[in-house]
Amino acid sequence: MPLFRKDPFGHAWVLISPERGLQASDFGSVARERSESALSPGQDGGLREIYALRPSAAQASGPDWRVRVVEHPAALVQDRPAQFAGTPPFEHATSRGFQEIIVEHPDARERLETMPRDHVVEVLRVYRDRLALLAKREGIRHVQLSRSVGTAAGSLFEHPHAQVLAVPVTNRWLEEEVSVSRSHFEATGTCLFCGVLESELEQRDRLVTQNAHFVAIAPYASKCPFETWILPRRHSGTFMSEAGNLLPDLADILQSVLSSVRTALNDPPYNLVLHTLLTQDEAFHWHIEILPRLTYQSGFDWGSGFYVNPTPPEDAARFLREALALQEVAQ
């Protein structure tokens, strides 16, 4: 029987409807066959390097990098003066901002979940440091990091990479979470995310995995099948303040979740997004959202405004836990 669930972190309702069924994915699996791509060392077509991790004796802009940050070749925003104009309801502004690509590994066939953990820690550190730097630029009001894996998820390159964006306007989805969480804090004096996390750890129905510093859950009102969130146990409003000694645990749980998604769902395309504020906030809790691309939105979805999810999050969490258990047995 279909069931409406209210999103604890927003204003929307999600329709959990197993009756719709999860059909064989039209998106297919993500192929990783070529060892080189347009982001590979020596193949980047002159993309301007912004930052890179490479041996200390290596030549700047040389090919022997481990992680590399380059200008986005098709950036939608540019480093230019921000000019706002117009009056409500018709306002506009110049597309000012910063858009970068973080190339996570020299080998195009690599995956975040299969890289050595130490390398993933380096990648996470670059994520954190680039976001922290851009967040300090004058006029910036929102920073985000996203990963798109597979063409169905909007990926531009068959290469492990992330995109970083910094803009002078707010983000619709993040602002909704902020609004709801601040209202909750004003009413209760407690963080909504921390309370939900405590309940999820106690009930365990939607718990995917955990370690000393991070927890992965299938959210109560999952917008899509097998949506998974990773949250720090300790309250923190901004990813940019995470200490370096916590990044190995974040690398572990991120690799575990991505491995379970890959195993359980036959390597689906997916999007990964980081929700973070620029600075610490007592009401908000940064988190990573992993969104497998397994279904389309139909006319009913667009017309009603509901997300329709054919997989109850409790079933998704159980399926991912079983995939993790099988991986541990196989190791």
Image (tube, grey):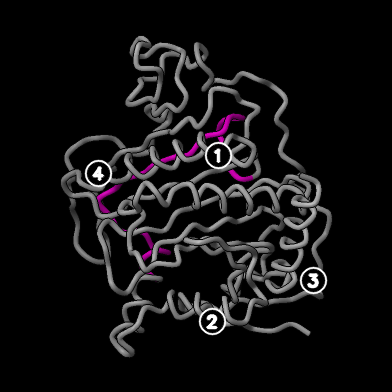
Which residue is at 54% across, 81% downward? 199
CA distance for labels 2 and 3: 29 Å
* Amino acid type assigned to the residue bearing label 1 in the image: Arg
Viewer-proximal residue among 26 and 149: 149
Mark 3 or mark 1: name the one nearer the start of the chain.
3
Does residue 37 lie above or below 270 as drawn? above
Name the mark on residue 117: 1
Residue 28 position by quadrant: top right
Mark 2 or mark 3: name the one nearer the start of the chain.
3
Segment tinted magenta in the rendering: 153-176
CA distance for labels 1 and 2: 30 Å
Q: Nearer the viewer, mark 4 or mark 1?
A: 1
Q: Nearer the viewer, mark 4 or mark 2?
A: 2
Which residue is at 35% across, 70% downward? 284
Mark 4 or mark 1: name the one nearer the start of the chain.
4
CA distance for labels 3 and 4: 43 Å
Name the mark on residue 152: none
Question: On the image, numbered disc 2 is attached to which residue?
Answer: 199
Discs 3, 1 touching: Cβ within 8 Å:
no
Does residue 28 lie above or below 40 as drawn? below
Question: On the image, numbered disc 4 is attached to which residue?
Answer: 94
* Amino acid type assigned to the residue bearing label 4 in the image: Thr
Which residue is at 70% across, 30% downward? 32
**Is disc 3 surrounded by few (<14), some (14 to 19) or many (20+) residues within 10 Å?**
few
